[in-house]
Amino acid sequence: MANSVAEKLKLYSYWRSSCAHRVSIALALKGLEYEYIPVNLLKGDQFNPDFKTINPMGTVPVLVDGDFVISDSFAIIMYLDDKYPEPPLLPCDLHKRAINYQVMSIVLSGIQPHQNLALIGYLEKKVNAEEKTAWINNAITKGFTALEKLLVNCTGKLVTGDEIFLADLFLAPQIHGAINRFQINMEPYPTLIKIYESYNDLPAFQNAVPEKQPDAPSSAI
């Protein structure tokens, strides 16, 4: 499925953003074409008045669909799932659906906000490098410990079986960042690693990794 040129979606993104990473996976799964508009968070593009007009929060990702703007990864993903329902991102089974929501919530509120660029910048002004690293590692390992316990008895290849659902879109970027950006030891989380390794066989996930985004620096490839 693809939009016509006149209706092509626009995605304001930054290559290393795990929030944008989730949306890139969703767009790939839905087979949607879109225009990628880079927002360099390190250079402060998010504070540009033109961008703040689009998203007053000054964050990525932002999806523009015609004259409609959505500026939160979860809201964007659910909007895409409602507008383009195939393949569905939530299972019909009530219990599996609840697990998807739990995984999403742990990543969305329990891990990612404690390691995002804005917080890291604040910590760098207040504490030394060792304390900053300890803060980030604690947030990630606490979340991963909870996820490991939640998923240890209920996974197939992926989070809730062998089909891709919402939780996978949140888990894949979080683990990718933990390994490649924060050098988290994943040995205590065998279930998470098993799931993460399954994403290597899925083109929608591999094409969405940060290193393959248009604004990724050559050193990241």
Image: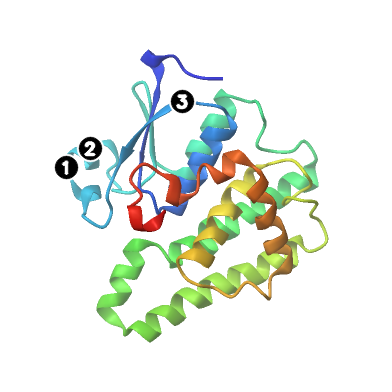
Residue 77 left/right relative to 50: right
What residue is pinned by disc 2? 53
The residue positioned 49% from the left and 61% from the top of the image is 177
Name the residue furthest left: 49
Q: Quadrant of residue 105?
A: bottom right
User: Decide: marks 2, 3 in contact (CB < 8 A)?
Assistant: no
Separation of disc 2 and disc 3 at Cα? 24 Å
Q: Nearer the viewer, mark 3 or mark 1?
A: 3
Q: Amino acid at mark 2?
A: Thr
Residue 100 left/right relative to 20: right
User: Would residue 157 be seen by someone viewing this image from the given angle?
Assistant: yes
Q: Please state the horizontal and vertical placement of residue 161, each as a whole percent of the image.
A: 79, 47
Quarter containing the N terminus:
top right
What residue is pinned by disc 3? 33
Q: Earlier in the sequence, mark 2 or mark 3?
A: 3
User: Decide: marks 1, 2 in contact (CB < 8 A)?
Assistant: yes
What residue is pinned by disc 1? 49
Disc 3 residue crowd, few under 14, some 14–19, many 20+, Cα 10 Å: some
Q: Quadrant of residue 30?
A: top right
The residue positioned 53% from the left and 30% from the top of the image is 80
Asked whether 34 or 217 is in front, the reply is 217
Q: Amino acid at mark 1?
A: Pro
Q: Please state the horizontal and vertical placement of residue 165, each as a whole percent of the image.
A: 67, 42
Q: Secondary structure at mark 2?
A: helix
Disc 2 residue crowd, few under 14, some 14–19, many 20+, Cα 10 Å: few
Q: Amino acid at mark 3?
A: Glu
Q: Earlier in the sequence, mark 3 or mark 1?
A: 3
Asked whether 81 or 175 is in front, the reply is 175
Q: Secondary structure at mark 3?
A: loop
The residue positioned 64% from the left and 42% from the top of the image is 202
As drawn, 138 above or below 174: below
Asked whether 71 or 43 is in front, the reply is 43
